[in-house]
Image: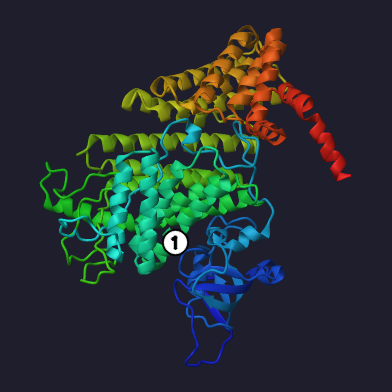
Amino acid sequence: MASKKLVIEYVKQVEETPELRRSKKSDVLSMHYTGFFEKSNKKFDSSRDRKQPFEFMLGAGEVIKGWDEGLQDMAIGEQRKLTIPPDMAYGVYGVGPIPGNATLVFDVELLDIKEKRSHDASALMLPLLLLVALIGGLFYINFIGGTTKTARLPDQSTESRAIGTLQIMGRPKPTKPPKKEKASKKQAEPSTFEDFMEEGVELEEKGERYGDGEKSQRFYERAAEMYGKAHALNKKDSDCLYNWGRVLFVLLQFLPKRVDPMTKLKLIDSSIDKFRRALALESKNADAMFNLGQALNTRAETVQEVDEIEDGYNQAAIAVQEAISILEEAYTLQENELTPQLQDLSINEPEHQHQHEHEHQHDHDHDHDHDHPQGQDTESGSASTGDPSTTVTEVIPTTAYTLIDTLVATANAQSTMGSMLANYEKSLDLFNSAKDKLHQAEQWLGKASRENEKDYQQAVIQIALQRAQVLSLLADRTMTADGQVDDKSYTLALEQLDFVTSKVDPRHCEAMCDRGDLLSQYAQAKQQSYLRSGRKLDGDASGKEVWQLFSQASKSFQGGLEIEPKNSSILRKLGDLSLIRAQLPLTVAEKNKQQLLKNGEFYYKQVLESDKQDIYGAWLGWAASAWALGNWCADAGKRTEADKIIKMWMKRGGDVDVVQGAYEENDCFPKQFVDWVMVTYFDDEEEDDDDDSE
């Protein structure tokens, strides 16, 4: 039977001396270890076999809980045997070769204690324990539902939903020192910890006011610089680290669309590092936990795009699992804080008074304007004591909206993990848990303040969109498992999105675009299922249904375009849908082929008016539309035009890798078109590559 508690056995101890140093939180430990399964005694990983010590920061949440607790107060040269129960290791679901509910045994030896890492910290930002990622081998299913052909996480980014601004953060917890009296002369440059913190907060406020332009970016970059300088003066202030990590995460939204994924990953990992270090100093900071969970989810989406990382899919799965664990812990802390407040309200207030007079409005934006009087204690451990290296922390109260945010984020992470697990039954457990989280969120909505109706409306929309996303991923996972179309999940998901656009906000662009994506996914699932049976779509009721679903998807994106007419993501989606519909093996598609291809040309050219470097999408889409008009609709002039478009595309960087990658990522490009591009423009290159390899 698996152990219920962490067991520490002292295999080798060292002699106590006055100079002997033992490990403590925030130390960087260099270890050798070997991991075994308790039941079988089978080895599953070993740093000794790799002849490479493993480094991590103790108490920063970089490793499983059993390591963080079992390796404290350890001396260099000491050797321990840790028997770690599932709840302090990889839990109910397991990770990779680690099955669910597994008790693990580690033989660990401490080689060194360092004040900082011996190499780039970004290399160590693999969540949970680096051990599993180093084992190698794909142990999760390849996500192939919908239009996705490669082993990637389902794309849940804002860009994939074809809307504008990326909402990154949850509830910021800004740190701001007591205000000083205004000087009559020009203020001196910051020089103290307090000065740098105050300057950082003020720069953040300016960044928020300027929105998402270049000026806003510069303010955020300077704010990050100020927090970095403040940290150099006081490395023990958790709020400084938290603010620093949050600003770095905000800066993600300012990266160019086609930024090198490694550049993006380094920024994410730097943010994760700050959140982990903040939690090492203040382990019960629910805001830091929430934002760390969000950052880990973003890491999961990004790590698979980095060519230099071979096991990106595995790392993504590990990141998502840690995000789930952290978000659940954050929720528990938040619930424990809020529940007594609500109980006090129900006891002390008249029935007609629904809101506590001090309840604060829920706000996703940073609110730095409420400072505590000097000398007042704060929850974060930083209080004004007269010491210039301490700060007063603005405590943003926990509200029902806070818990809703966390529950929705947890449901998002759980459904993502559910789409990745190879075991279908365990996948269903995660999807059901995600649904439960959203049900809890609705219950909190009933207790939420309606002082600001906009906040309430946003929470309603947030829950509905996430429920649609959970159902969409469940439908895809079911299709992967048994090849059957999950009509019930698709229908329920569409009902959620229709509810938003018909009952809550008729001009909600994200809901419209999510609806377009969902209808496209549904149509493709229907088409794949029908063709797999060996039947023809044309002349069958299923063929008519597929056509109608694609047509509805196009109308949904057109509705989004009316709201955001310059949105290149929506334009690109409409171009892709036009190409897909033109290729359907249906009589109605044949009749409309020419017009659909002309529509595709129009949409792709609209994208290029604002983004001439879209070599993966719009240039190839425009060329494919022209090529199809020339070859399928006998328009000789379009064949010549397609040739010119491809040559312009090549001048902007289009090559073999781009066209192959675009074909693998997107179902809209006809295979005949891709073959034509490869043979006509790159055949000589492939022959040269073959010669070089001989």
622 lies above or below 225: above
| Residue shown at 44% from the left, 49% from the top | 294
204 lies above or below 161: below
Query: Which residue is the site of mark 1?
Result: 276
493 lies above or below 198: above
Element type at mark 1: helix
| Residue shown at 63% from the left, 47% from the top | 422
Percent from the top left, x then y, of residue 265?
53, 50
Percent from the top left, x then y, of residue 73?
48, 80
Give the amino acid at mark 1: Arg
Percent from the top left, x then y, of residue 604?
56, 21
Position of 529 compared to 169: left or right? Answer: right
38 lies above or below 22: above
Quarter location, residue 136: bottom right
| Residue shown at 77% from the left, 30% from the top | 682
Q: What residue occupies the far right of the structure in this picture? A: 694
